[in-house]
Image (cartoon, rainbow, N blue to C red):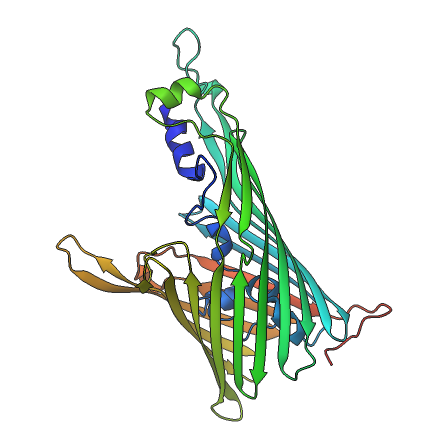
């Protein structure tokens, strides 16, 4: 019976018993979506213009030429134990506004539940083993608006979250994002505020049948509580460079700023932590793309109290075939860093829906 308790200790969030701010809350929403972005170390908030803008920077939804897009992504972590899936759809509302919906799921399925492994007579009964899933769901509703100021765009997200750990715990969450983008020639600047009003997760725990096992293993029974995710700010700047008639390059530097205490990132203080990352995208006639990036930049403490420099290199490839964009990312080349790595594939399909009141192209 202790086996499942140890598993639950890992997958039931470490939320405060009395409802305080929980560090690393809703971190599944910080992984990223789209192989293009992941192939550039998530450095895209100033240049993203497809349906994945609903996740990264909703203001970018207004830059898509087609009036509708659909996107899909699948990735696996920990040798396939954890699966990460994403789907999204966007549609132009009028000449100045676009709406989108994104759905994310990060989950571990088929976790053995051994609480009933031993029957009342003390016999081991493998037929009494069941399974459960621990999964996080995010539903993001986006709205983008073009400003009267040339080159300025705004966007906002409403997020509804659902997190479930079998029959043992579940939570509903709610929050908002706000973002802006400004284009000035070949320069692009962006600001994205995640969880701008703080995101609230209301947890409920079902501890029926767990009291005895938790007591034996020295674990404290969780109580229903409120988990808060503090706001974070992302700043981005990008520059387009023409190499030749057929080749061009785009580079972007982003910095993610958190305010929930010192984190293990490049710049960490008790007030805020700053996590910079940079990405490059080379293209041939806007058809074939090569992407490189560097993220998770940090100093790793060693046993002798020294520190070593560590970063996560990423590589990405993309190809555009008519209305399809097919992208691939390897998120840790050669397993160089201590960060998670995975092979990620994503697909974006662009098309024009024709109905009254909807412009077919961005003006």
Residue lying farthest to the right in this orientation = 356
Q: Quadrant of the C terminus?
A: bottom right
Q: Quadrant of the N terminus?
A: top left
Spot occupied by residue 304 in the image (x, y as percentages of width and height): 12, 55
Q: How many marks?
A: 0
Q: Describe residue 326's horizontal placement relative to residue 261 as left or right.
A: right
In front here: 12 or 114? 12
- On screen, residue 111 above or below 158: above
* Residue under the point 60% across and 70% down: 325
Spot occupied by residue 361 in the image (x, y as percentages of width and height): 75, 77
Whether residue 314 is visible here, answered yes or no, is: yes
* Residue under the point 46% across and 48% down: 25
Q: Describe residue 112's horizontal placement relative to residue 164 as left or right.
A: left
Rendering quarter of residue 256: bottom left
In front here: 170 or 316? 170
Rendering quarter of residue 7: top left
Q: Describe residue 313's horizontal placement relative to residue 360 as left or right.
A: left
* Residue under the point 39% across and 67% down: 314
- On screen, residue 133 above or below 56: above
- On screen, residue 277 above or below 169: below
Residue lying farthest to the bottom in this orientation = 245
Whether residue 1 is visible here, answered yes or no, is: no
Spot occupied by residue 273 in the image (x, y as percentages of width and height): 37, 61
* Residue under the point 57% across and 61% down: 55
Residue lying farthest to the top in this orientation = 121
Spot occupied by residue 244 in the image (x, y as percentages of width and height): 49, 93
Q: Describe residue 65's horizontal placement relative to residue 231 as left or right.
A: right
């Amino acid at each position: 019976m202790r086996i499942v308790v140890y598993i639950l200790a890992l997958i039931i969030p470490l939320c405060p018993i009395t409802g305080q701010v929980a560090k690393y809350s809703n971190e599944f929403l910080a992984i990223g979506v789209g192989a293009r972005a992941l192939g550039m170390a998530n450095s895209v908030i100033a240049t993203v213009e497809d349906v994945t803008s609903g996740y990264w920077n909703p203001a970018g939804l207004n830059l898509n030429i087609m009036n509708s897009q659909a996107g899909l992504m699948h990735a696996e972590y920990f040798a396939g134990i954890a699966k990460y899936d994403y789907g999204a759809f966007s549609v132009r509302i009028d000449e100045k506004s676009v709406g989108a919906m994104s759905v994310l799921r990060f989950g571990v399925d088929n976790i053995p539940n051994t609480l009933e492994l031993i029957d009342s007579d003390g016999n081991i009964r493998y037929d009494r083993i069941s399974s459960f899933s621990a999964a996080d769901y995010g539903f993001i509703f986006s709205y983008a608006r073009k400003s009267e100021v040339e080159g300025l765009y705004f966007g906002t997200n409403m997020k509804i979250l659902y997190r479930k750990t079998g029959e043992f715990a579940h939570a509903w969450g709610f929050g908002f994002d706000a973002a802006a983008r400004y284009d000035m020639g070949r320069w692009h600047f962006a600001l994205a505020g995640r969880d701008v009003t703080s995101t609230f997760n209301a947890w409920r725990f079902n501890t029926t049948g767990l009291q005895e096992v938790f007591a034996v293993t020295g674990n404290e029974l969780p109580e229903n509580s409120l988990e808060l995710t503090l706001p974070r700010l992302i700043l981005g700047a990008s520059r387009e460079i023409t190499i030749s008639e057929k080749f061009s390059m785009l580079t972007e530097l982003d910095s993610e700023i958190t305010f929930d205490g010192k984190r293990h990132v490049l710049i960490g203080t008790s007030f805020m932590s700053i996590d910079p990352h940079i990405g490059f995208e080379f293209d041939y006639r806007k058809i074939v793309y090569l992407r490189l990036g560097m993220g998770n930049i940090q100093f790793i403490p060693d046993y002798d109290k020294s520190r070593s420099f560590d970063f996560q290199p990423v590589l990405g490839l993309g190809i555009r075939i008519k209305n399809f964009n097919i992208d691939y990312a390897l998120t840790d080349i050669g397993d160089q860093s201590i960060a998670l790595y995975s092979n990620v594939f994503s697909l974006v399909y662009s098309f024009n829906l024709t109905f009254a009141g909807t412009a077919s192209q961005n003006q």
